[in-house]
Amino acid sequence: MKMIFLTFLFFCNVLFSQSVQIPSYYKSDPEFTKAVETIVTDLELDKNFDVGDDGTEQISLAVIDLYAKEPVFAGVHFDNFIYPASVYKMYVAAEVLHQISQGQYSLDSMLIVRSPNDVDRSKEIKSDPRPLLHGGDTVSVNYLLDLMITRSDNSAANCLIDLAKRENINALLLKNNWNGSEVTRKYLSRKFEDPGYEKIRGTETCALHAADFMYRIDKNQLVNSWVSEQMKSFLGRQLDNTKYFTGLPPNTMFYHKTGWYSFWTHDVGIVDDGDVRYIIACFLPLTEELALPKFKALAERIHQLIRIRHSK
């Protein structure tokens, strides 16, 4: 118990010492950066947005062009930590798969859903025929992973956070230098949180960390090749294609995780149309209604920008 308590204190301290640096394996290109900044300005996304009781917030955006031998990074407020909504479910999935790769359990291992983790009362994707999870249901880890990523199921996420344990998820994040993006909360009311987590600050992440996470997947370097390929498989079956995907050309593959809640609407993923390949991490402090047309326009502009870069 003492070790768990000390570990918990350590992660709490890390949360207040966020330090973001672009990794040295990314190349910078002033012309590319300027072009991305211009797109953001043209779409009126480079300003302070009202997010209700939380005051004001800024966009957090990162783009990684994967065409060249060295990946080229650009962004706007990419180091801004922002509430990620369901995007941080991808961090949970990574540690679950990590533990499976270590032999702690398997994709076919069965779990019993425990209340109060069964929080969902409606489906994020209405067309998905899979029923809502309820306390007492027995389902596989693989089923929970798929629900959590493809349908963004909160009940599944809560179950998997309990399985992986937050201190292990955060150890993986810190090992990859994603300090400040630690998973602090489950997707439920604070009054139902585990002891020690009732008053902890909400989970945040930034575009740089989310984009770098996708880059590790693309390079098969997220823990190992098996974990990376499994993550890509889940992300490739994403059912929410209402955001950045809407501005991409037909037949484009987008391995991604979306998130939205109240004033927050996000999309993070790997774009591949056969010729153009890049990573996008876009966190918008806007309601979904306002964010959706912005995402479409942003995707059209970013994709065209990178296509032009590739044609040079």
Image (spheres, rainbow, N blue to C red):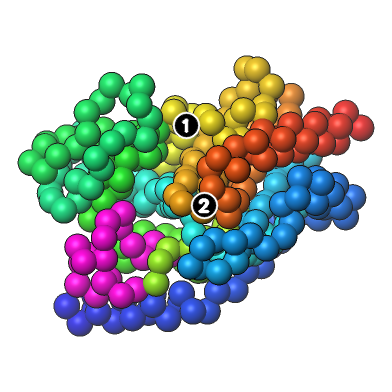
Q: Which quadrant would the N terminus be assigned to in this image?
A: bottom left
169 relative to 235, above or below: below
Count neighbours of disc 1 (C-alpha within 10 A) and say few if under 14, some if 14 to 19, many if 20 or more. some
Identify which residue, 7 or 60, lies in the foreground.
60
The amino acid type of the residue labelled 2 equals: Trp
Q: Which residue is mark 1?
A: 240
254 relative to 166, above or below: above
The amino acid type of the residue labelled 1 equals: Asp
Q: Position of residue 109 (x, y in %)?
A: 18, 38
Q: Tag 1's secondary structure?
A: loop
Does the image show residue 171? no
Q: Which residue is mark 2?
A: 264
Q: Residue furthest top?
A: 251
Q: Position of residue 140 (x, y in %)?
A: 20, 35
Quarter location, residue 2:
bottom left
In the image, the segment drawn in magenta is 181-200
Count neighbours of disc 2 (C-alpha within 10 A) and say few if under 14, some if 14 to 19, many if 20 or more. many
Residue 167 is marked as none
Q: Main secondary structure of the magenta part?
A: loop
188 relative to 217, above or below: below
Which residue is rendered at x = 78% and y = 35% of the image?
Answer: 301
Residue depth check, mark 1 versus mark 2: number of the one nearer the observer: 2
Residue 77 painted magenta? no
Q: Position of residue 16 (x, y in %)?
A: 49, 79
83 relative to 179, above or below: above
Q: Tag 2's secondary structure?
A: strand
Identify which residue, 13 or 115, lies in the foreground.
115
Quarter location, residue 151:
top left
